[in-house]
Image (cartoon, grey):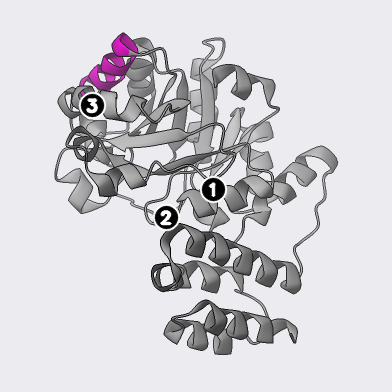
Amino acid sequence: MLYYLHMQEHPLFLAPLAGYTDKAFRQIAHSFGADGSVTEMVSAEGLARDSAKTKALLDRYPGEENLIVQIFAPSEDPVARCLDTLLAFNPSMIDINCGCPVPKVVKTGAGSALMKDPAAAARMVRTIKERTDIPVSVKFRLGWDSSSINYIAFADAVYEAGASVLTLHARTRAQGYAGQADREAFRQLASHMEGSGAFLFASGDIFTPEDAGAVIDGCGMDGVMFARGAIGNPFIFRMAKEYMASGSYALPSAEEKVMTALSHLRLAIDAYGEAVACREMRKQLMAYIKGIEGASRAKASLTQACTEEECRSALLALIGK
């Protein structure tokens, strides 16, 4: 996996997003040029207990060669206990979540709570590296809050423990997803890690091809993790690559948006069945059609849609089909 990363010129990945980056979304992202994608956040404790529901998050889409799994845990103990189950899925890389700000995760000591204990995060990295030869990645934040900015020291701790890929979401835990990501922090991290061999991804407020170019060319990061910017917009991978290659890019048409949304829905139905997929995909289908004339009417219909045909009718009406 590390060789693959270094062979790509500024790889663009689909970031881990709870409730979104299932195998259907990862497959759609790949079809539009994503160089990699990360699973939804997976509980190390759930894997350790052999939970079928947790293991289902690790299902691959057909042809998914690189399975990058993100786990969360408060300490090295559940990480150690989950490894046998996790390794059975043959992951290409294991990512440790040290950035999730959601209270139900943080109160367990996992996610961005680990920004207050870099040594604990380092022990998790070391636990994996002592038992496997799989590359380890860590996603982290600027710090717990504005009075405890420690991302440079945190990066040092997990890198020295064996993490070879580092993803910085340039906000504090206290910010959540509000405010502005601090792009100067990307520049500082890139400068600090220069020559180390660590691979650096940027995350946070990266919604456009221009944003991707700014954090790569302007801040010195190696790649980008598109998160919210990819919801309903897998085209961002294609557009960003066009922009970095030529300085311009083509926007998707309304028809391409609608037809891609329907393809995404079909993949979800194949994976989970019609009733579950139509319910769980509503938020994503609405994101696909944002900005299309008549979208508000279609959204009202999608809110009530329970079948593939009802979703198709609402979406195709937007393009006169």
Query: 53 and 132: which one is in front?
Result: 53
Label 3 secondary element: helix
Which residue matches tag 2? 179
Q: Amino acid at mark 2?
A: Gly
C-alpha separation, residue under disc 2 versus residue under disc 3 = 33 Å
Q: Quadrant of the N terminus?
A: top right
Whether residue 165 sits left or right of residue 4 in the image: it is left
The part of the image, by quadrant, that contains residue 255 is bottom right
The answer to whether the residue labelled 3 contacts the one labelled 1, judged by CB atoms less than 8 Å apart, is: no
**Region rendered in magenta:** 119-131
Q: Which mark is residue 79?
A: 3
Q: Amino acid at mark 3?
A: Val
C-alpha separation, residue under disc 3 versus residue under disc 1 = 24 Å
Which residue matches tag 1? 26
Instruction: Name which residue lies at 39% across and 27% down.
Output: 94
Q: Which mark is residue 285?
A: none
Mark 1 crowdedness (10 Å alpha carbons): few <14, some 14-19, many ≥20: many
Q: Amino acid at mark 1?
A: Arg
